[in-house]
Amino acid sequence: MGRHKAIVLGITMLAGITSARQADAQTFRTYRCADGTQFIVGFYDYDKRAFLQIDGQPVALAKRLSVSGARYSGAGITLVIGKTGTTTVKHLKRPVTACAAIEKPGL
């Protein structure tokens, strides 16, 4: 649980939240990918970027134009969330890999 809190704290600091009201308008989701990659992505109502914690590093990804869903990229990472819910990530010169959200009981 301590590691999860540290990751959430890192994402929160990266987002620059300045008030409790803004912090309430957020969505976090954890993903596990076919190649073994795991990451957490955070979205905030007031910001169009996606905030990732991947490979132990926080990264802010800018939203890019896409007709088939949402695409975010930056720092050599591309995250695609399709309209049907399919999710892929490409990072560190690795091939694109399919990812699925991990449901955490009790959270």
Image: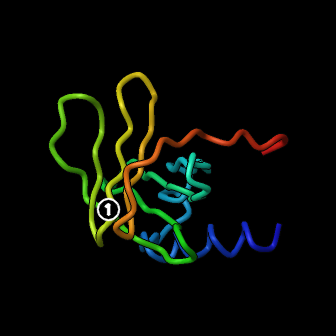
Q: Is residue 52 left or right of residue 73?
A: right
Q: Is residue 107 left or right of residue 59?
A: right
Q: State the SS at label 1.
A: strand
> How many numbered badges does the structure rendering display?
1
| Residue at image location 35% in from the left, 43% down from the top | 80
Which image quadrant: the C terminus?
top right
Above or below residue 85? Residue 89 is: below
Rendering quarter of residue 56: bottom right
Residue 17 in picture, x, y percent from top left: 46, 69
Above or below residue 28? Residue 9 is: below
Above or below residue 83? Residue 56 is: below
Residue density around tag 1, few if under 14, some if 14–19, many if 20 or more, within 10 Å? many
Residue 6 in picture, x, y percent from top left: 68, 75
In depth, the one of 62 and 20 nearer the eye is 62
Rendering quarter of residue 82: top left
- Residue kind at label 1, given as amino acid type: Leu
Label 1: which residue? Answer: 61
Residue 46 in picture, x, y percent from top left: 35, 53
Q: Residue furthest top?
A: 84
Q: State the colouring used for the structure image.
A: rainbow
| Residue at image location 56% in from the left, 76% down from the top | 10
Which image quadrant: the N terminus?
bottom right
In depth, the one of 92 and 86 nearer the eye is 92
Residue 77 in picture, x, y percent from top left: 34, 63
| Residue at image location 27% in from the left, 58% down from the top | 73
